[in-house]
Amino acid sequence: MSKVKTGIVMMNLGGPATLDEVEPFLLQLFADREIIQLPFQKWLGPFIARRRTPRVRGLYANIGGGSPILAHTRAQGRGMVERLDRLSPETAPHQFYVAFRYAKPKSDEALRAMHADGVERAVAFTQYPQFSCSTTGSSLNELWRAAGRTGLRDAFRWSIIDRWPVHPGFVEAMADTAREGLKEFDPEERDRAVLLFSAHSLPLDVIDRGDAYPQEVGATVQRVVERLGVVNPYVLAYQSDVGPVRWLGPSTEQVIRRLGARGEKRVLVVPIAFTSDHIETLSELDREYGEVAHTVGITQYKRAPALNDRPLFLDALADIAREHLASGEVFSTQYPMRCAGCTNAQCRNVLNPAARASRRARGERIKSATG
Amino acid sequence: MSKVKTGIVMMNLGGPATLDEVEPFLLQLFADREIIQLPFQKWLGPFIARRRTPRVRGLYANIGGGSPILAHTRAQGRGMVERLDRLSPETAPHQFYVAFRYAKPKSDEALRAMHADGVERAVAFTQYPQFSCSTTGSSLNELWRAAGRTGLRDAFRWSIIDRWPVHPGFVEAMADTAREGLKEFDPEERDRAVLLFSAHSLPLDVIDRGDAYPQEVGATVQRVVERLGVVNPYVLAYQSDVGPVRWLGPSTEQVIRRLGARGEKRVLVVPIAFTSDHIETLSELDREYGEVAHTVGITQYKRAPALNDRPLFLDALADIAREHLASGEVFSTQYPMRCAGCTNAQCRNVLNPAARASRRARGERIKSATG
């Protein structure tokens, strides 16, 4: 294999590949103060993680014994790289590297593999379409920490793709999943199905700090609805809230209950902030909320397929990367904009070769944004 | 004057034209359960309204002795109608009628004037770009009630413009206000100003019922930023929360405080959900938050001008109305979609000639949505 010129790091949450990886996955998730802030986190985090393990193991057992997210991410990476080699010969050969936040393979492994492959140019490409400090932010901070840990801080020339909420290819791929979902309804009833766009929720404390996520999710929904061009009514809701704090609503589960209670019979759920099937689609949306829907009298409850390895989405990923490589951009103008209420001194400010390169160019801005 | 063929009802909140109208304005606002839900509202509403009157009178005294919203709305109406007569001769002559929710002129007056002018076709045109049950929803419900009260229930052939969050003309007009605001900064520092988009907040209980507002505001911000094409960092925040319940954040005031605390020196506030200057721009954004900004060390705090009678916005209003008239649409496909958690039996279901006409056409859909 020829030396890799451009390495693309696909960053995502990850999931336990086997049942035995459920506990370590939860331990890492509940240890990350960039996603969850608990009092006495060093003690309370492991306590909660261990207490939840049996139930979560059961959920993974029900969806085939593990998360399919690694298989999907690899299929996405292969499809993207094949396309990029054709679309952008000047940056070829390309290779993808998976960096999950709470499951293998992690950032350290990705960086070592890139070094072994002789990568020159590295792109940190978030697989979360909409930016949140708790997802993309945490993954990027961890990537820079891993660069420090592995001694590879200066090994690559970095740039960042930190968000793509309204990229036309992504919007088209997402609209196509909704189209496919709508086909599941009888043609004469199809127009009456409620489109229920569902995104992962966030605690309101994160929202109140100024996280960009709800604004960008709202923008994605608008664009997908426009692209779809259907007459179905739609609503955006947020799923997967846990614990005692208040989360951003409306809650997907509550919306399903209430739509049923008022007599709606047809609901199509469209996961709007995930790119792969995982526990939140296969277990929560399909099984858990599917049962809720049945209970409240929604006779036709369907879920649009996840993007997974759908060719339109592979096209989109390749196009996002190609545009980025061609632009010469180090990071988006929005990346240095920390949340107004940021409480994380590391945020957008850790061992980041991209930021160091651009700090020289941008001077005061970075200083004032991180000071 | 020739008989009016098309009457366009411009619906908005309204504001007290004189200081003596402050108390009645607040009394009506705090009596409307579609915007504020209080325990023992018949007693507590007037109590709160009367207690707030002296302070609010003082605020209006400081901005010239009353709200300018009626003057702006009339200028907008005149500009829109002039353009429409040219753009849409087949529906001419057009006339505009102002229907404020809590100040004169109200819906009853608008309907009587339309009847006197011999209006045939009537368009209920919300002046809130993004839909919320507490604004456009409440105004529409009140309009239909007024039609009943005045005996003019069947006097006109109605249609509705209930939202226009990403209409290209509106987006362009809004981007133009931001451009003008940016010109207030020194050219060499302009790119570093933080764009702080500010929309009126809503109580989280409204959000949790499934109100469309935050999704649509997020979509507007995305489109305006794209249209602007500048490198400035941006953030969306929500202003004007009052009382003990929790409101949608982040709070505009908090964001200003925190941006100042971390050393930002330049902020441009862009009102993203208002179309006219009124107390929330002239008093809250300019004076109150201006003082906050000064206190926390933001040396250049500017506010983008409101749309008011800017020609680009008059063009947008006319274009929105022209498109609507040409489409033959009675209401948007989203209008019958009540919030999943709707607690208002009147909502989208009152004496509404448009709904009655279309109920025949749409049959079961309306039944199931309102049943």
Image (cartoon, coloured by chain):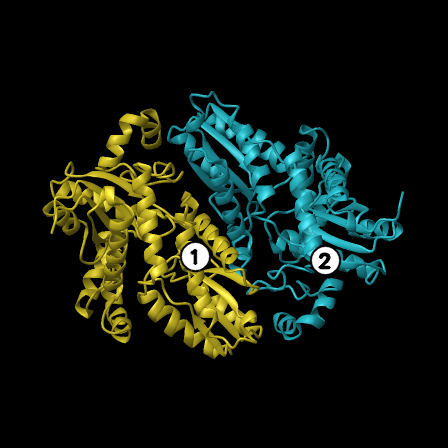
Chain colours: A cyan, B yellow
Q: Judge whether residue B173 can be spotted in this image.
A: yes
In-front residue for pair A113/A51: A113
What secondary structure is marked by label 2? strand
In-front residue for pair B115/A200: B115
Which residue in the structure is indicated by mark 2? A159
Which residue in the structure is indicated by mark 1? B172
Place of residue A315 in the rendered image (x, y in percent of width and height, measured from the top left): 66, 39
What chain letter is assigned to the residue under label 2? A
**Residue B277 in the figure: left or right of residue B234:** left
Q: Marks 1 and 2, Cα distance to the nearest angstrom? A: 31 Å
Asked if residue B199 is positioned above or below residue B141 in the image, the reply reads below
**Residue B275 in the figure: left or right of residue A65:** left
**Residue A138 in the figure: left or right of residue B183:** right
The answer to whether marks 1 and 2 sit on the same chain is no
Select label 1 or label 2 by which is in front. Answer: 1
Place of residue B62 in the rendered image (x, y in percent of width and height, measured from the top left): 28, 75
Q: Residue at x 41, y 49 (%)?
A: B167
Q: Residue at x 42, y 64 (%)?
A: B177
Residue type marked 2? Ser
Please identify the quarter of the rendering in which residue B77 is found: bottom left
Q: Bin the neighbour count of mark 2 within 10 Å (Cα to Cα): few under 14, some 14-19, many 20 and up.
A: many
What secondary structure is marked by label 1? helix
What chain letter is assigned to the residue under label 1? B
